[in-house]
């Protein structure tokens, strides 16, 4: 199977940016001459309280189970039935794909669910878009809470970020790109309008997608849906709290500090890089150092362990889910 050159170049750029950010983060660790930086991270891992790290594991898995059940509720409101088990398998497959292809997990989990239950991809993808809108609202609420408790420190942190004002030339370039996008989109729309078969397929896909988008308005148990949403984000917060409690150097940080680190981490994870790798390893240590005066070496090591432990859970869960999906489909076929 051949991939378009544009896709290959885009993927290479994403991997390059991720690798550069990881290198930049590792570069900030200062160890004694003759010592390896990865050995320092391993030593930090060995010093961690494994009870707290296992509590993080439980928080991660429980948040995914609840998210799968919430997704099942959205699908049910579109008159498509699936089980919690199949929804969970598809969700974990999506997380696995996200580690390789940024934002690719949203489509892959819909396709995996289609393989299991024949739910149209355009319908399930519409429900995923609804989920992402809800997550965006929750992220804004988290940021507002963090700034309400630690506004002075967080505004100070933002002022240290290398964000420059947009110059006139950059504005003209952005405007030119926008106009080209409009022209290209108009040409595509004109071409589709003259091709009846493609037009019919797109109309059918749009109806399915719209059905998924409107799923939020048809949910029977809205209070339960809201409760699931709140619980998912409480568990996300618990993941940050348990990791900080796992190390002596960060165990003294309280709820307010954890909320700030959680908010910075949520922003870093939203960057379109594989699993947030790179952006998370740069922003979170910077926040821990500037806001709470942690040593740079410790902050970077903690971040690598937190993200690495979470990534291991995603890889293991996604791989097992892929295997169970294949087994289920084979049994159903037989």
Image (spheres, rainbow, N blue to C red):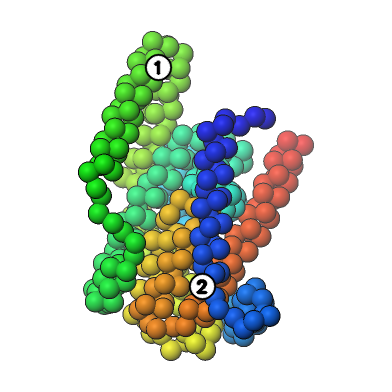
Residue 41 coordinates in the image, percent (x, y): 61, 76
The residue lying at 40 percent from left, 50 percent from top is 131
The residue lying at 38 percent from left, 61 percent from top is 267
Answer above or below: position of 83 versus 180: below
Within 10 Å of disc 2 (Cα), the crowding (few <14, some 14-19, many 20+) is some
Per the model, the C-alpha gap separating discs 1 and 2 is 52 Å
Residue 100 coordinates in the image, percent (x, y): 58, 49
Query: Residue 201 sits in which quadrant?
Result: top left
- Quadrant showing the N terminus: top right
Please give the label number shown on residue 28: 2
Element on which disc 2 rests: loop
Element on which disc 1 rests: helix
Near-viewer residue (119 or 79) = 119
Q: Is residue 94 left or right of residue 261?
A: right
Please give the label number shown on residue 192: 1
Nearer mark to the viewer, of 1 and 2: 2
Q: Can residue 61 be seen in this view?
A: no
Query: Residue 228 sits in which quadrant?
Result: bottom left
Answer above or below: position of 6 versus 247: above
Residue 234 coordinates in the image, percent (x, y): 41, 70
The residue lying at 54 percent from left, 36 percent from top is 7
């Amino acid at each position: 199977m051949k991939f378009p050159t544009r896709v290959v170049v885009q993927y290479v750029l994403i991997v390059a940016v991720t690798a550069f950010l990881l290198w930049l983060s590792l570069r900030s660790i200062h160890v004694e001459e003759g010592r390896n930086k990865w050995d320092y991270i391993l030593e930090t891992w060995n010093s961690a309280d494994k009870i707290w790290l296992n509590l993080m594991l439980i928080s991660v898995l429980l948040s995914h189970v609840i998210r799968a059940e919430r997704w099942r509720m959205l699908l049910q409101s579109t008159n498509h039935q699936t089980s919690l088990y199949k929804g969970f398998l598809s969700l974990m497959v999506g997380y696995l794909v996200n580690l390789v292809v940024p934002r690719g997990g949203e489509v892959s989990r819909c396709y995996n669910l289609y393989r299991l239950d024949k739910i149209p991809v355009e319908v399930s993808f519409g429900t995923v878009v609804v989920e992402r809108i809800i997550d965006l609202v929750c992220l804004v609420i988290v940021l507002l809470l963090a700034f309400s408790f630690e506004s002075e420190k967080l505004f100070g942190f933002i002022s240290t970020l290398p964000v420059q004002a947009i110059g006139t030339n950059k504005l003209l370039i952005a405007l030119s790109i926008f106009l080209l996008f409009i022209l290209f989109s108009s040409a595509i729309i004109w071409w589709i309008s003259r091709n009846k078969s493609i037009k019919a397929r797109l109309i059918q896909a749009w109806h399915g997608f719209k059905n998924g988008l409107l799923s939020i308005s048809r949910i029977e148990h809205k209070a339960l849906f809201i409760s699931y949403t709140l619980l998912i984000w409480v568990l996300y917060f618990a993941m940050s709290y348990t990791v900080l409690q796992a190390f002596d150097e960060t165990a003294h940080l309280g709820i307010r500090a954890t909320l700030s680190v959680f908010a910075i981490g949520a922003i870093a994870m939203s960057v379109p890089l594989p699993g947030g790798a790179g952006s998370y390893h740069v922003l979170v240590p910077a926040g821990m150092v500037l806001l709470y005066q942690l040593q740079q070496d410790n902050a970077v090591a903690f971040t690598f362990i937190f993200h690495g432990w979470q990534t291991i859970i995603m890889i293991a869960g996604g791989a097992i889910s892929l295997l169970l999906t294949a087994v289920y489909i084979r049994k159903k076929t037989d």
